[in-house]
Image (cartoon, rainbow, N blue to C red):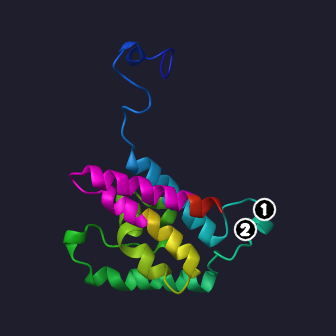
Amino acid sequence: EIGVTGRSVLLEIETTRFPTCFPIDIMHLFYENIALYMLKHWMGCFFKDSILNDQPYVINNKQWTEIGIEMETVRKSIPTDFGRPPRNILHHHNGYKAEEWASWITLYSLPLLKDRLPANYLKGWSFFVKAVQLCQKRVLSLHDQEEIRKLLLLFYQHYER
């Protein structure tokens, strides 16, 4: 009665090419999935097996506490034009909405992870951050699209290593 009950009628439109004719949904893919998964890697809780979580990119609890305090401290000085002020990611990441993840990715993650995340992992993350920043532009040129593709590929290659 409800939900997916059969083949989509959109598949009958000959000019529709799945999935290439649909843009990436950055809210779900970038903001609510990749950002959360990377955070879980850095917190050492991505895998159920603690041995798999014992990696050089895991940031210790003391440093996450410092990051959270820095986020709480900066709340008072963030102009409202920047959107919602950041909440302590250590305590509130499970309740983050897409807007907060977007801000974490594009505004806060690189400066807060600098000198805490090993440099090669920070560089890998920076490819993703730059790609997301470009995706947020109102108009994307062909050059922007190629740059996004290149940056996401670099991020993927870094992550898969």
What residue is pinned by disc 1? 49
Q: Quadrant of the C terminus?
A: bottom right
User: Residue 31, can we see it?
Assistant: no
Residue 5 higher or lower than 54, as above or below: above
x 64%, y 81%: residue: 60
Question: In the drawing, does residue 3 fall left or right of residue 140?
Answer: right
What amino acid does circle 2 point to?
Answer: Asn
Whole-Å distance between the Cαs marked 2 and 1?
7 Å
Q: Residues within 10 Å of mark 2 (few under 14, many from 20)?
A: some
What amino acid does circle 1 point to?
Answer: Asp
Residue 27 higher or lower than 86, as above or below: above
Question: In the drawing, does residue 85 fall left or right of residue 96?
Answer: left
For the record, the magenta segment spans: 129-156
x 21%, y 53%: residue: 138
Question: In the drawing, does residue 2 fall left or right of residue 40?
Answer: left
User: Residue 14, can we see it?
Assistant: yes
What residue is pinned by disc 2? 53
Residue 54 higher or lower than 148, as above or below: below
x 30%, y 55%: residue: 144
x 33%, y 63%: residue: 133
Main SS, magenta region, reads helix
Q: Which mark is residue 23?
A: none
Q: Quadrant of residue 18?
A: top left
How far from the left and from the top, in percent, is residue 94? 51, 61
Q: Secondary structure at mark 1?
A: loop
How far from the left and from the top, in percent, is residue 91? 51, 72
Can residue 149 be found in the magenta stretch?
Answer: yes
Q: Secondary structure at mark 2?
A: helix
